[in-house]
Image (cartoon, rainbow, N blue to C red):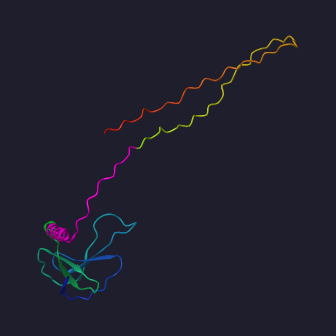
Amino acid sequence: MAQVVAKTGIKKAKGYLYFVDKKGNVSRAKMSRAGRKKGRVKKEVVKKVGVKKESGYLYFIDGKGNVCRAKMARGRKRGKRKAAKKKTAKRRTVKRKAAKRKPAKRKAAKRKPAKRKAAKRKPAKRKAAKRKPAKRKAAKRKPAKRKAAKRKPARRKPAKRRRR
């Protein structure tokens, strides 16, 4: 896929980015790492090659240290569409006709409104009323009536209506 333009045999050092500069020489620049100051880095020429660059090609240094070039991808959209259309055309001829089935009728599921848990409330503090000393009657005693704490009924959301 890539063509070797010039055999240089450069050995790459860690922490440097190797590239082909505008003049066609192999250059390197120190890569940005944590703690390094921002700004441009000084480029140093590793080897003078003088490769003449053509437009439409990407120039790089491969693993062996040689200057290589690869054709840049241009206008891929048209090719993919044509290939996709050809594949779909072939598939249509191969597929068998499936037996027609009637769609199953679905029953509308009725949902019950979600039950909400009643919030626990602390019982209201009652003021202690001063009682008069009771007269002792052995015959009849009436049970004391207590007032029940009033609770508000839980609010329900209105049921959503489905369109048919």
- Give the side of residue 32 with respect to residue 127, left or right: left
Name the image quarter holding residue 135.
Answer: top right
Residue 28, percent from left and from top: 27, 77
Question: At x 18% / y 68%, what residue is drawn?
Answer: 92
Q: Which residue is painted at 32% across and 76% down in the image? A: 16
The answer to whether 69 appears left or right of 120 in the picture is: left
In the rendered view, would you say 136 is above or below 55? above
User: Going 35% across and 38% down the picture, which residue do you hit?
Assistant: 162
Could you tell me residue 84's position as x and y percent?
Answer: 18, 68
Is residue 15 toward the left or the right of residue 22 in the image? right
**Left or right of residue 123, residue 68 in this image:** left
Count numbered badges in the picture: 0
Does 46 appear above or below 94? below
* Quadrant, the N terminus: bottom left
Q: Which residues are magenta?
A: 80-108
Quadrant location, the C terminus = top left
For residue 90: magenta? yes
- The percent position of residue 154, horizontal first and vertical second, equals 53, 30
**Quadrant hosting residue 33:** bottom left
Residue in front for this viewpoint, 123 or 9 = 123
From the viewer's perspective, is residue 32 above or below residue 144? below
